Image (cartoon, grey):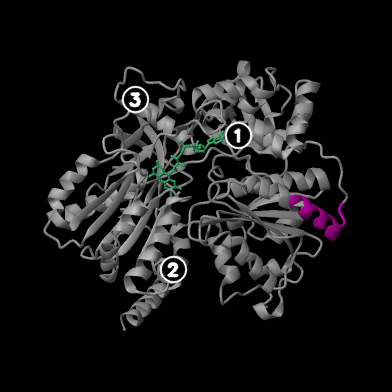
Amino acid sequence: AQLDTLDLVVLVALLVGSIAYFTKGTYWAVPKDPYASSANLNGAAKSGKTRDIVEKMDETGKNCVIFYGSQTGTAEDYASRLAKEGSQRFGLKTMVADIEDYDYENLDKFPEDKIAFFVLATYGEGEPTDNAVEFYQFLTGEDIAFESGATAEDSPLSSLKYVAFGLGNNTYEHYNSMVRHVDAALAKLGAQRIGAAGEGDDGAGTMEEDFLAWKEPMWAALSDAMDLQEREAVYEPVFSVEEDEMTTPEDDSVYLGEPTAAHRAGQPKGPYSAHNPYIAPIGESRELFTVKDRNCLHMEIDIAGSNLSYQTGDHIAIWPTNAGAEVDRFLQVFGLEDKRNSVINVKGIDVTAKVPIPTPTTYDVAVRYYMEVCAPVSRQFVSSLAAFAPDEASKTEIVRLGNDKDYFHEKITNQCYNIAQALQSITSKPFTAVPFSLLIEGLNKLQPRYYSISSSSLVQKDKISITAVVESVRLPGASHMVKGVTTNYLFALKQKQNGDPSPDPHGLTYSITGPRNKYDGIHVPVHVRHSNFKLPSDPSKPIIMVGPGTGVAPFRGFIQERAALAAKGEKVGTTLLFFGCRKSDEDFIYQDEFKTYQEQMGDSLKIITAFSREGAEKVYVQHRLKENAPLVSELLKQKANFYVCGDAANMAREVNLVLGHIIAEQRGMPAERGEEMVKHMRSSGSYQEDVW
Ligand code: FAD
């Protein structure tokens, strides 16, 4: 009988869950193009924005649109690459389009002689990216209505030819579900797919190779379908980059790292969002580890007076700045050192091309603030530089790297080189012939990084805490340390703030005071992103949290909140935390704070630890979870919420499996039934993940 009740609860929760899911799009809706107001060079702004893709393609003489649904910029990058390749190799008239910039009701009027690409990332628990939520709802919704009035049964999209590629992660249960569902929905509506629907797997680390392997047969199929003639690809710039000798970097019109025109004018104003960050003061910063060779930062980011707000469990995005050492390397490799402070104007050659960086700016600023120059490099991008190599020997080497996947892995990928390091490994001569436009096109925009807020909004509504481990690793096979962009920048800010005698132990150097010194006094650009990772509204409900390492971040917020409620005399349910780290005296972060919370909460707070390097055997949180199966099962019977945060690749998956076993074993059910129960818990929102 108990199971029946549980099933009913699950069904109701499922319904509530899907309502929440489908309203989330509007909640998260963000303003469009960040530079639309600032960059009059922006193509879309110039030609007047239409939301009608058919009209837009007609107006601009395009026969191929590449829509992207992107969260972190990778899908957008793949879309741009496909657009370039389509144009350069096959003479297609391509345009790239943010999927939220267009309407979908007239896709039934999409001309038969044109082609639409859908490059779609799957986000979180099989969800569309923020910019693809509306598209997804439209295409898969019950009340789908095209302009012609056609319904799903009428094959309204029979004139639409499309190509599909998905970006996913197989460590998530709903692997590549976005592209799979969109592909199925398009097919159901009568559209005709060209080539196979590609799937890239970030979980297996094969995204780039999956993409490369998928696109060749796709191009062959598309050439057949559209009768395209392949030609030798020559570089055709999407942007023009002109040096402006009349303007100095001090001129008010020049962007020196500011994210928007209002910031440049020194008058930033809210609402602050993913396109308009708040320059927040860092109130306090400190080290959490006690060992010398690894660092974990605790920072308090002050949002008072910004009108920004957050809820316990939300995320904050930090907008980083590249390290000076890497900016120098990049400028040196491309022969731009001497003119690093020259002012440049970047314009879209074609009206549909969006200039991805604020302009006018300088080479130095573009590389420091706006371009992702430290990321791993793709084989395709390296091979696009062959035509601009400084001599025949390096050209031959680049061509070999481009053609030989294994060789590229050995020489570049396994060495963890960024683009400038990769070219340095080929020759010491500078690549002065590479057009800067090619670098803007080929590299991503510098992306903000997200952090799980580690404070409670109830306790400190104007101060957001973050807990970030500094990425400084020697990956197997690599000859140098790989330094994370954002965490090393934050580390430098912390060192500066605390007047540390060695502010730059990694030799990286940063422009700490920011554009026009606007970040002086230790400020950092941020925005807040709301999440679904939430405490139960009733604090008397028990909760189980699994958060090893920095995975404990949101749970510090959860515990801070429940301790405050307990101190106010509210009834707080069992609050069980599984925490893991290497050693109790090295990286057991917030240990002292937890003692204080323990005093406030008494028996209702239980912290179970797993130290992986203290005993003969390595012990992880999932082992502790198993050992405590009766307690976990009992709390679940009391309708506990279950939370997992941290490493997506291994830990989260293991915990998921172990929980299924615990439920099955403790309730005397077959193993599959345990797994199903966990699935139900996920869809009903009582099993929540915040993993990365
Ligand atoms: P990046 O420069 O982005 O590098 C990341 C990693 O990529 C490096 O460690 C390295 O392994 C690899 N890499 C980088 N360059 C190369 C190269 N050239 N070749 C090969 N490999 C390379 N992190 C926390 O510490 N605490 C949190 O609370 C937290 N919460 C998060 C919440 C969410 C929702 C998400 C999505 C992520 C969260 N993260 C958190 C992770 C965080 O966003 C960053 O990814 C992390 O801090 C690393 O950022 P970085 O800029 O320092 O490193």
Q: Amino acid at mark 3?
A: Gln
Name the residue tied to disc 3: 495
Crowding around mark 2 (Cα neighbors within 10 Å: few <14, some 14 to 19, many 20+) is many
Residue 496 appears in which quarter of the rendering?
top left
Labels 3 and 1 touching (C-beta < 8 A): no
Task: State the predominant SS element of the stretch in magenta.
Answer: helix
Label 3 vs label 1, nearer the camera: 1
Residue 390 appears in which quarter of the rendering?
top right
Name the residue tied to disc 2: 675
Quick one: SS at disc 2? helix
Q: For residue 602: magenta?
A: no
Looking at this rendering, what residue extends furthest in the bottom direction?
1
Q: CA distance from mark 2 to mark 3?
A: 47 Å
**Left or right position of 235 against 187:** right
Label 2 vs label 3, nearer the camera: 2
**Left or right position of 552 against 89:** left
Q: Which mark is residue 414?
A: 1
Q: Position of residue 610 (x, y in %)?
A: 31, 47
Q: Position of residue 579 (x, y in %)?
A: 30, 48
Q: Which mark is residue 320?
A: none
The residue stretch that appears in magenta = 215-228
The numbered mark, 2 or 3, whose residue comes first in the sequence reads 3
Crowding around mark 1 (Cα neighbors within 10 Å: few <14, some 14 to 19, many 20+) is some
Looking at this rendering, what residue extends furthest in the top direction?
338
Q: Up-down: is 68 above or below 537?
A: above
Residue 686 appears in which quarter of the rendering?
bottom left
